[in-house]
Structure formats: structure tokens, C-alpha cells
Amino acid sequence: MPATSPISRCDPQAVIIRHGSDPHALVQILRELQAELGWLPREALTRVATALGLTLAEVEGVAGFYRFLHLRPVGRYRVLFSDNITDRMLGSEALLQALCRQLGVVPGAIVGDDPLVSVDRCSCTGLCDQGPALLVNHHQVVTRLDATRVAQMAELIRTRVPVPAWPAEWSLVEDRIERADVLLASPPAQGAALAAAIARGPQGLLVEIERSGLRGRGGAGFGTGRKWALCRKAAGTGRVVVCNADEGEPGTFKDRVLLSRHADAVFEGMTLAAFAIGARTGFVYLRGEYRFLLEQLEAVLQQRRAAGLLGSSICGVAGFDFDIVIHLGAGAYVCGEESSLLESLEGKRGNPRVRPPYPTESGYLGQPTIVNNVETFCAVTAITLRGAAWWAAIGTAQSSGTRIHSVSGDCARPGLYEYPFGTSIRRILEDCGAADTQAVQVGGPSGVCVAVNEFDRSIAFEDVPSAGAFMVFDRQRDMFEVARSFTHFFAHESCGFCTPCRVGTALLVRRMDKLAAGHGSPHDLDALFEIDRLLRGSSHCGLGATAGNPLRETFNRFRPAYERRLRSLHLIPGFDLDAEVSIARQVTGRDDPAAHLEQQG
Amino acid sequence: MNPSASLKLPDGRRRLRLATTSLAGCFGCHMSFLDIDERLLMLIERVDFDRSPFTDFKKIGHCDIGLVEGGLCSVENVQVLREFRAHCRTLVAVGACAINGGLPAQRNHLDLGQILAEVYRERPGLAPGSAVPDDPELPLLLNRVHPIHEVVQVDYFLPGCPPSADAIWSFLNDLMDGRTPHLGHGLIRYD
Ligand SMILES: Cc1cc2nc3c(=O)[nH]c(=O)nc-3n(C[C@H](O)[C@H](O)[C@H](O)COP(=O)(O)O)c2cc1C
Ligand code: SF4
Ligand code: SF4
């Protein structure tokens, strides 16, 4: 620990009391403590453990789970470069190297007890339409990085200028809405949908949502009305509404814009859900990378409370009591999976739960809970106001309404594009000004890769489903490298709970890296597909089950990109075999032929 | 004797040739192989042993099956393994050491140079002037111990430390009869 223990600068007690000494607020308490201390000294964790009636091991176990929580000093400036493939395509890697050079640090390394700065990479920060981007001290973002910004940033860090005093335009986050349809064009007037719902009654609202055919926008596409009905019917007291604003799927940033522009519609959707299922408690699980949105979201909540749209007797209806608390995530993609999200909300490590029971039966603290995506709640608000028939008339038979796409990569106009379901991929490419496109990754790394001959396919649950990301790759891009980057993402984000995924994702990465290094043979491809099969068949949650998707999706369409990396028919070691004899050669002073090994034998 | 005559079994099937070797292992896997006891007699009805500690042949000929115990800790291990790969239609990694590096790989978190220095130069009780042996006949050690599949293509893995005699017997019978080997419950053991 550094000589001047930072704990003297902060009283954990104040933070703990602010959270009512509630052990379920542990993740929030740790986040806030760290915001003050820069890291989490054991001394502070011990105090937290005592105050919450937990053991130190439990508290350290939670702190150790999240990437944005640190058990050792990581620098007064913690700089994380967003490492999505789209950031890389915009040159993030060279900028990262430049910053490190100028600051005299090594990427990923943390040197000394009280370093000034550390620089590392993190998973996509959801700023793909204005990248390359980075995150400082798990709070401020810097968008549109270039060599000038990086040079100035190095200077600001060297001269210890606090991050809030950095040029304000650096952290400007644009809401780039390039094509608006029913959701993005005209946000409903505050409270209007609530009034309509109250007129219909909870059961009437439920029926309306079911009839609209609305399916969840977070990925799985489960019927929203059905989910709500299950939750309403479930045994047990208490009901909880959770908005999944974890938006961790690389290449997705629509929820960021919805929360920034249409927070009222999101919160109203949550309140409508509470009305329909009889919930009094609501949470927004906001990804840590969107910490910069927190204050404005809190302000909207406050304003809604003042307007009688949250709190007790909402809109004057006796017994209609509901309020919303915002929880911040701490850099874990798996916490977007609904059961991990609930664990995290309860102040625990974000390991996925065993299902069943599903959250609708037993969710937050065992209470029946619905978890829905940000966009789903926006749609709920629109449907309540304008009717199920109106919504169902948009889109296709099995995919009603619109879908918002986060478009990034090789195109002239990245940003949000909202279209009715059933819109062709070709149309979206034309609208965003994509030229010479060879592939689109729809729905992020866990989604689908679509090649030129499939551009007439359309986005819909019955054709190409999408969790909202739309990353465009032109002919200059190497699709093997795209898949390799996605594979690294999954390995980085594996929560480590189950062996197939913890080990399998690491093995995938090793083989992909081996191919990239020019040590590949057909045997490596066989091994890759065998690992993928194991991952799909035996992983505990969707992360492991989809970790092999980039490999399979790109291999099926861009096979030569793999084949040109196969250097031999026979297996070759993935490491330099002769270098493995280097120490023994040195120690014995030998250099005879028997002291060497050929790479291929 | 006409070699092709001995290649046929009475039922018309071809006799198979089997080679085995112990690389960086403890011979425990070979001992377990011998534990098939009287079933060895049934085995030699169907196979001829080529290079193996059981025959003490030093050179390997063309074989149907090669069983490899132990991982790679030296240059010689790599050479023997490559000879096995070049001569065996089917190559099997037998036991934890061949599959994962096993016990010998416990040294992987130590620096080889330091280990050698401590053992040959700095240990108390060494004769003055003791040095790390540098005779060209001695195989040099690798910086780290590797499982065999990292260097050659391996067709099957027979886990266990050692795999039980029953597991080895069932595995060999599957191979000899043309079935994809499946150990199933009871025969897979990791200790
Ligand atoms: C690894 C993983 C990550 C996920 N991340 C998110 C996410 O960031 N946002 C989201 O809404 N759903 C995410 N999901 C899906 C959720 O588990 C859940 O299905 C969804 O929030 C339900 O809301 P919906 O019905 O409105 O789509 C993820 C699922 C998995 C398996
Ligand atoms: S599949 Fe991966 S992310 Fe999911 S529980 Fe297993 S280790 Fe964790
Ligand atoms: S696997 Fe076990 S029995 Fe076989 S060589 Fe290794 S240590 Fe010995």
C-alpha cells in the first residue's frame, strides 16, 4: 500500500450509510468508494464488510469480479481505450501506442505502488459512431480521438490536470439519429401513455401489449406481453421491474441514445410495466461505461417524481406506487444476461443463475421480476399510447414494429437507423452510405455475419434477427481478423464460472492467434470447430454458447481468409520450438546440431 | 519367414503393429498397461509389438498404433515423438502427462536456468567446480514442458493418471475392432 494510505482521505461509513447499510447495495458502495479512493484498499473493504455484516472474503470476491473495481492502485488516471473492431478500424491501436509512448508506460501494465497513470484496453464503450473512444477513471469519455487529442491528453496527465478540467468538447457525446421512425421521431408527451393505461386498467394494458406482438429487443426476442403475464400470475409477493441498460454487445449504442434523448419514454415504459404486473420496485441497470449519463437520468427521475409520475399514488391512483433506482454496472458484459444482472443488482458477483426458475417466477431477491431492454420499454410506451393494432401493422408477421440499428464501421454516415422490421440489409447499407461492402455483422459478435450474396435478406426474427448492432466491413477488411477480435472479446468477458467457457474461450483465442501468427494447419481448424461444438453444447449461459459464432459465421462465408493462413498440412507448434531450448543452450554453452530443434519435423 | 504370412490373423484380419514410448512420464502408464495381466496374451494374438519398453527395440518401424506416455521436456522427447508421428497411423496420448504436461509441467512456473544452476552449481555438498553437464550426448531440456498435441497431431486422448488397465484394454479393443473409442463412465479417471 502507498505510504499515504488513501483511506484517510475518505470515510467508507458515509458511503455505506448513504446506501442504508444494505448488503445488496454492495456493488454500488464499492463503485462509489472507488470513485473517491481510486482503488479499493483492503482496509476499506474490511470496514465495508463489518458494516454490512459480510465477510471480507465475500466483499473481496465481489470486488474482484468486476473489471472496473480494483484491489490495487491502478493510477490516478486510468485510461481505457475502447477495443471494439470499429475502434480498431478507426486507428485506436496506433493512438493507444502513441499515448503510452508519450507517457512512458506499457499498455496493460501497472507499475509501482502509486502510479500516475495506467493505460489499457476495454470492451466496446458504445461510442462506435464517434470513435475511436476511451474512458477515463471509469467516468468521463473522450470521443473522436486523434493524434492531437492524444498528445494534448498526455500533456494534461503529465501536468496532473484533473479530468473534469479537460476540454469539454472532448467528452461531447453526439446522439446521431440518421433515420427516425415511430420511436425516434416523436417521443410521446410525458405521462400521456400512463393516462391511457390507467383508463384501460392493468389487465387491459396487458392484453394490449400481448396483442401488439411486441418481442424483446435485447436479443432473445421473447414476447413482452407473455413475459409480463407470467410475472403477474407468478406466486409470491412483491413484483420488480428491471430495465436492462447494460448494452454490452459490441457495436450496439442505441440504448445510449434512447437514454440520453428519450429517458422519459423509457421510464414511462417501466412505470407501465409496474402498473400491469403490480410492481412497486424498479431498477435501471446502467452499464458502467455510461456513467456519464447518470446525472441527467437522475434529474429526469426527479422531475417525474415532482410531476407525480413516480412515487406513491402515481397520477392520483391510490395504491399505484412505484419508483426507480439506477444501479451502475462495473465493466462486465455477462451482467447483461438477465440472471447475472439480477445477481449484480443484489450486490453479488455477476455469475449467471441456474434457470429455471426464470426471473418471472423468482428474480430480484426471489420476487417475480421482469427484465426488459431499454428499447422494449420505449416501444411499450408508444404502443400504450397509439394502440396494439397500429404497432402490429408495422413490420412483418412475426416481428411487429420497428427496430433501431446502431450502424458503425465502413460507411459514410454512422449512427442510429430505425426501420420497420422486414427492411433489407441492402436498404440499410444504401442509406448509411456504405460502399464496396463485403460483410455486415448483425447483432454484434454473438449475432450473424452476412455476406454480399445475402444482402437482400431482411432484418426480422424470421430471417436475420438482430440485437441492434450493424457493423459494416468493406473489401479492405480481413474477416478473419474481425472474427479473431470478437473471439478475444468473448474470452476477455467469460465470467469463469463454468469450465467449458472459461477454458474453451481461451483455447479458441489461442488457436486463432496461432493461425494469425502463421503456424496454422488444417488440424487447427478441426480443433477450433471441436471447441465450438463443446462450447455450444455445454456452456452454462449464452456467452459461452455463442462464443464460437464469429468463427463459424465468418468461416462459412470467408473460408479463404482462413485457408490462406494454413502454412502446412502437418500440425506445427504454435510457439517457436527452437527458442524453447534457449535457456539450456545458454546454461551449457552448447550450440551443436543436437542443441537445436526445427520448427517442423 | 515370409513377413506377410504373419500379417494375417486366422479369421483373415490383418495383424496390427503397436509401438509405445515413455517421454517425460513416470512409466506409471506403462505399468498400468501391463496390469491388463493375462489379457496381454489375447493382445499378442492380434498385435505385434514394435518399438516399446516391452520389446526394447530402439528403432520404430511402420506401425498402426502408437501409444505415447509423458509430455515433452527435452529435445530428445520431441525427436522421439516426431518419429512416432511419422511412423504411426494412429497416435494416442496416454495419461495426464502426455495430455496436459502433468506432473513434470509443475516446473513451468520456474526458470529453467535457475533450476539447473541450483541443482548443479549452488546446492550444498557439491564438489568444487561442479557445473551444469554439457556433454553433447545429453538431450537439452526445454524451457517449459509441453503436452504432445502442441507439437504433433494427436488422434486420440486416453485420460487418467494413469488410465486404468480396464480403460487401456477397452480403448485398444475399440481401436483394433474399428470402433471410435469411448470410455464412458467408470473408465474415465483423473487420479
Ligand atoms: C451474455 C449475454 C449478454 C446480454 N446482454 C444484454 C444487454 O446488454 N442488454 C439487453 O437488453 N439484453 C442482454 N441480454 C439478453 C438478456 O438476458 C435478456 O434476454 C433481455 O434483457 C430481456 O429483455 P427483452 O425481452 O426486452 O429483450 C444478454 C444476454 C446474454 C446471454
Ligand atoms: S458460459 Fe461463460 S459467461 Fe456464462 S457462466 Fe459459463 S463461464 Fe460464465
Ligand atoms: S500420467 Fe500419471 S502415471 Fe502416466 S506418466 Fe504421467 S504421472 Fe505417470
Image (tube, coloured by chain):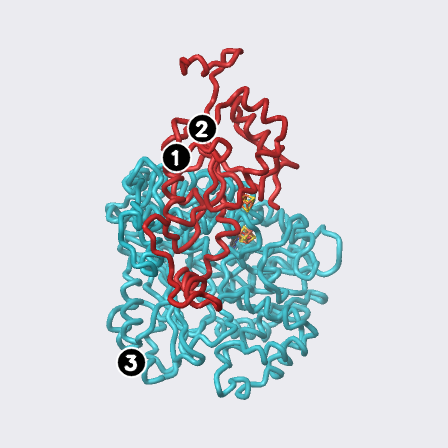
Chain colours: A cyan, B red
x and y percent of residue B175 in the render?
52, 26
Locate the C terminus of chain A and report the quarter of the image it occupies: top left
**Which mark, residue A155?**
3
**SS at circle 1:** helix
**SS at circle 2:** loop
Nearer to the camera, B149 or A320: B149
Disc 2: host chain:
B
Instruction: Tell me if residue A141 comes above or below residue A433 in the rendering.
Output: below
Instruction: Tell me if residue A96 comes above or below residue B13 in the rendering.
Output: below
Nearer to the camera, B75 or A354: B75
Residue A580 appears left or right of A333: left
Residue at the (35%, 37%) spot, across then down: A522
Nearer to the camera, B72 or A586: A586
Residue A316 appears left or right of A192: right
Total numbered labels placed on residues in the image: 3
Give the residue pinned by disc 1.
B85
x and y percent of residue A562 in the render?
32, 41
How far apart in space, not on screen, are marks 3 and 2 (Cα)?
A: 71 Å
Residue A158 appears left or right of A316: left
Q: Is residue A574 visible?
A: yes
Q: Earlier in the sequence, mark 1 or mark 2?
A: 2
